[in-house]
Image: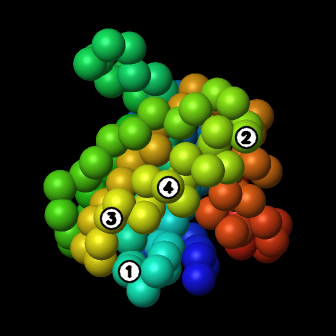
């Protein structure tokens, strides 16, 4: 069984939140909710972040929001964070996320990186078994 929900306890620092808000030209009081997801998969509890950015060769370039998502994931106790670039092909993506999750165990933390997260939000949420719009974060 695959079940996911937003990890409301994942937090970036106040400084990172402010940097993200400034980069977006937004004003907001309080904590910023990033796309950090708690998933139960095959009896394992795994935390995943969806971070905007790209991996070119071995160089990781995260967007400001991606940086916030990574930092929020890092606030959750667990193993070293594994980084994966998401496929640009929707059919591959649908299998990629569960396939990667199968390889991990309770306590693992995964950061999925893509430069098309916003455009592909519905496909990504479906891959996480989160196609209920009420469970999505802004």
Q: Which residue is mark 2?
A: 91
**Looking at the image, which residue is at 48% across and 76% down?**
41
Q: Label 4: few (<14), some or many (≥20) within 10 Å?
A: few
Report the side of 110 relative to 132 (left or right).
left
Q: What mark, if any, has residue 107 been given in the picture? A: none
Q: Quadrant of residue 130?
A: bottom right
Q: Secondary structure at mark 2?
A: helix
Who comes first in sequence, dot 1 or dot 3?
1
Q: Which residue is mark 4?
A: 99
Nearer to me, 33 or 114: 114
Q: Are marks 1 and 3 in contact (CB under 8 Å)?
A: yes
Q: Which residue is mark 3?
A: 104
Q: Secondary structure at mark 1?
A: strand
Residue 32 visible, this orientation: no
Q: CA distance from mark 2 to mark 3?
A: 22 Å
- Between disc 2 and disc 1, the foreground one is 2
Q: Which residue is mark 1?
A: 44
Q: Is residue 40 depicted above or below 115 in this figure?
A: below
Q: Residue furthest top?
A: 57
Q: Secondary structure at mark 4?
A: helix
Report the side of 81 relative to 67 (left or right).
left
Q: Label 1: few (<14), some or many (≥20) within 10 Å?
A: some
Q: Residue 9 appears at what percent x and percent y?
A: 41, 75
Who comes first in sequence, dot 2 or dot 1?
1
Q: Are marks 2 and 3 in contact (CB under 8 Å)?
A: no
Q: CA distance from mark 1 to mark 3?
A: 8 Å
Quarter of the image with the N terminus is bottom right
- Between disc 4 and disc 1, the foreground one is 4
């Amino acid at each position: 069984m695959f079940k996911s929900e937003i990890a409301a306890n994942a937090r970036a620092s106040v400084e990172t939140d402010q940097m993200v808000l400034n980069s977006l030209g937004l004003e907001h009081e309080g904590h910023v909710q990033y796309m950090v997801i708690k998933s139960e998969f095959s009896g394992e509890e795994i935390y995943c972040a969806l971070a905007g950015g790209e991996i070119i060769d071995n160089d990781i370039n995260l967007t400001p929001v991606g940086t916030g998502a990574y930092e929020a994931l890092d606030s959750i106790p667990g193993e070293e964070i594994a980084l994966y670039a998401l496929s640009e092909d929707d059919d591959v993506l649908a299998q990629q996320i569960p396939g990667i999750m199968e390889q991990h165990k309770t306590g693992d933390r995964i950061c999925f990186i893509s430069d098309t997260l916003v455009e592909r939000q519905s496909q990504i949420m479906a891959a996480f078994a989160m196609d209920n719009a009420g469970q999505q974060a802004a």
